[in-house]
């Protein structure tokens, strides 16, 4: 996805999320947190700082599973999903990492939410 197109698609996604949530997510991390909560499937609740980090990890694994980087192993006794790294992460630098994650987040919402 071209950089200009990615930025345009990202802004469209943020606008859609603002319509649904009543508030525009501040950044990529906020969107990843939302995906993590969605994937956990336990609804809105209080999460500890550590759980919030785990939710963001769940989201990253989920969106990178579309590229075959992660694969779902299963869930633990508390219902939290666990992922297995299938291939090395292709991140060259932070900018490339953010671009890949944004593109995969857009794909997530196209596949899973805004069908």
Image (tube, grey):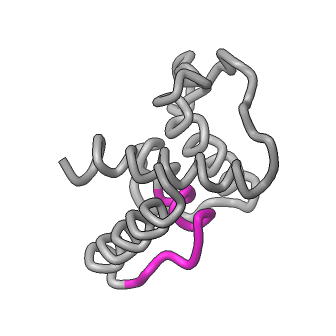
Q: State the image quarter where residue 16 is shown.
A: bottom left
Left or right: where 41 falls relative to 115? right
Residue 112 place in picture, x, y as percent: 29, 43
Residue 24 place in picture, x, y as percent: 43, 81
Q: State the image quarter where residue 61 is shown.
A: top right
Residue 86 place in picture, x, y as percent: 65, 15
Q: State the image quarter where residue 94 is shown.
A: bottom right
Q: Is residue 84 above or below residue 111?
A: above
Q: Name the foreground residue: 43 vs 28.
A: 28
Q: Is residue 20 above or below residue 87?
A: below
Residue segment shown in magenta: 23-34
Residue at horizontal 36 percent and vertical 66 percent from the top: 13
Q: Name the foreground residue: 52 vs 31.
A: 31
Q: Is residue 31 above or below residue 106?
A: below
Residue at horizontal 59 percent and vertical 40 percent from the top: 58
Magenta stretch: includes residue 40: no
Residue at horizontal 44 percent and vertical 42 percent from the top: 39
Q: Is residue 37 above or below residue 57?
A: below
Q: Which residue is outermost to the left?
A: 115
Residue at horizontal 58 percent and vertical 49 percent from the top: 101
Q: Which residue is outermost to the bottom?
A: 23
Magenta stretch: includes residue 32: yes
Q: Name the foreground residue: 95 vs 87.
A: 95
How many numbered badges does the structure rendering display? 0
Residue 60 place in picture, x, y as percent: 60, 43
Left or right: where 48 falls relative to 110? right
């Amino acid at each position: 996805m071209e950089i200009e197109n990615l930025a345009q698609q990202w802004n469209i996604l943020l606008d859609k999320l603002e319509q649904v949530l009543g508030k525009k997510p501040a950044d990529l991390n906020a969107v990843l947190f939302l995906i993590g909560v969605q994937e956990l499937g336990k609804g809105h609740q209080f999460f500890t700082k550590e759980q919030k980090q785990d939710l963001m990890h769940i989201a990253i694994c989920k969106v990178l599973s579309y590229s075959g980087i992660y694969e779902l192993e299963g869930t633990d006794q508390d219902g939290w999903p666990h992922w297995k790294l299938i291939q090395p992460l292709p991140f060259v630098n932070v900018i490339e990492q953010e671009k890949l994650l944004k593109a995969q987040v857009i794909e997530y919402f196209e596949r899973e939410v805004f069908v």
